[in-house]
Image: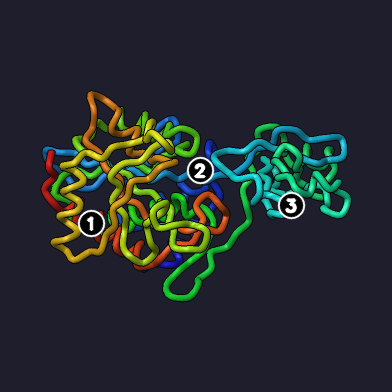
């Protein structure tokens, strides 16, 4: 696999609403391979390959969870809002990059030291509204750097290889999916027209996928995303049965916990088609019902008069943290399965 491409994607900065840094990496990689790209006014990046009577749309989102400047006090300390679902307990002491219009500034997320907390405070979770970012700069300096209300903030993390073909890095959700889509586009000789969409603003409501599906009007939709791998302590198999290294996950259904509302129930023919392709090709895969989240496929299937859709997910430990762990084997299996889908006759 191309570890350097995965590294470039993971380490690129692109919170929701400011995905242009990631788009630049993707455009460069695809254009070198001869794949034509174009963008819409919202920031979605499109790439097309193949021709034919049917259109397969495959989506992977470019945005990562992050922060945005909410207020700068007189001493230069920055208060922030969250972009996407971030647990408060993982924020203290994180190193961040504030993307000022004239200069990028590094900082650290601070809060009251445990030594000066009262006994009752030590027992409580420190919520993000009681945290701040310390850059060492004054308010006047930050204003000179072009840091103001609305400036995006990302987390500083590098990609690292672990043992047994595992890698850890930030924004694997969904830069791993972007990697899969890029590699599949480069390798496939499509049976029909394939429109790859690298969507924006997925983490705040599947916005990019909603408008791009309405523009593309595909016959079938597939989202490529990550999902929760539960093969670590403090998670039971029944709550999170997906495992690293056991292959990509074909999602049966997802949505809100306790109801699966607001998510996707995969079209049974599309899901069965993907399963059959995997089995015929000897690609290991897993099946999943995910409570607590959804993907771009939920937006695609609700566009137009309804688009038969499914989702292929990459197992990931510690999803929506800034150190997400994935398996190279799962990544390669996901690329192989997507190539087979692009090169096969579709069920619709």
Q: Are marks 3 and 1 in contact (CB under 8 Å)?
A: no
Q: Quadrant of residue 184?
A: bottom left
- Please name whichever residue, 255 or 93, is drawn nearer the observer in this view of the structure: 255
Judge from the rendering whether residue 129 lies leftward or rightward of residue 315; answer left or right.
right
Dot 3 or dot 1: first in sequence order is: 3
**Nearer mark to the viewer, of 2 and 1:** 1
Foreground tag (3 vs 1): 3
What residue is disc 3 on? Answer: 108
**Residue 180 place in picture, x, y as percent:** 34, 56
First-in-chain label (2 vs 1):
2
Q: CA distance from mark 2 to mark 3?
A: 24 Å
Residue 262 visible to an observer of this rendering: yes
- Disc 2 residue crowd, few under 14, some 14–19, many 20+, Cα 10 Å: many
Rendered view: 177 above or below 144: below
Residue 8 falls left or right of residue 225: right
Q: Are marks 2 and 3 in contact (CB under 8 Å)?
A: no
Residue shown at the point (84%, 48%) measured from the top left = 119
Q: Secondary structure at mark 3?
A: strand
| Nearer-N-terminus badge (2/3) | 2
Residue 142 or 35: which is nearer the viewer?
142
Mark 2 highlights which residue?
Answer: 20
Q: What residue is pinned by disc 1?
A: 339
Return the x and y of residue 125 as percentages of the image width and height: 70, 45
- Residue occupying the point 39% across, 64% down: 244
């Amino acid at each position: 696999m191309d570890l350097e491409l995965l590294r470039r994607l993971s380490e690129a900065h692109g919170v929701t609403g400011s995905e242009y840094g990631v788009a630049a990496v993707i455009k460069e990689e695809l254009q070198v391979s001869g794949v034509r790209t174009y963008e819409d006014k919202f920031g979605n990046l499109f790439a097309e390959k193949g021709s034919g009577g049917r259109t397969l749309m495959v989506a992977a989102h470019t945005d990562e969870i992050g922060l945005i400047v909410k207020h700068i006090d007189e001493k230069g300390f920055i208060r922030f809002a969250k972009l996407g679902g971030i647990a408060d307990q993982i924020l203290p002491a994180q190193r961040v990059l504030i993307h000022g219009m004239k200069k990028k500034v590094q900082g650290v997320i601070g809060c009251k030291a445990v030594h000066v907390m009262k006994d009752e405070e030590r027992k409580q979770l420190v919520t993000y509204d009681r945290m701040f970012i310390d850059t060492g700069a004054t308010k006047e300096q930050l204003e000179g750097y072009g840091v103001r209300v609305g400036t995006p903030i990302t987390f500083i993390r590098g990609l690292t290889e672990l043992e047994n073909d595992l890698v850890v890095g930030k924004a694997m959700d969904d830069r791993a999916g972007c990697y899969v889509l890029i590699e599949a586009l480069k390798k496939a000789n499509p049976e029909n027209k394939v429109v790859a969409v690298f969507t924006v603003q997925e983490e705040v409501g599947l916005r990019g996928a909603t408008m791009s599906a309405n523009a593309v009007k595909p016959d079938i939709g597939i989202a490529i995303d990550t999902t929760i791998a539960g093969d670590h302590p403090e998670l039971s198999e029944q709550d999170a049965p997906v495992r690293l290294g056991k292959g990509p996950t074909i999602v049966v259904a997802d949505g809100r916990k306790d109801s699966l509302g607001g998510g996707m129930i995969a079209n049974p023919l599309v899901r069965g088609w993907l399963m059959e392709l995997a089995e015929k090709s000897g690609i290991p895969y897993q099946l999943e019902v995910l409570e607590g989240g959804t993907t771009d496929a939920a937006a695609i299937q609700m566009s137009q008069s309804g688009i038969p859709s499914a989702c292929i997910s990459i197992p990931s430990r510690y999803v929506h943290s800034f150190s997400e762990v994935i398996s190279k084997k799962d990544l390669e299996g996901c690329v192989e399965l997507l190539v087979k889908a692009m090169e096969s006759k579709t069920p619709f």
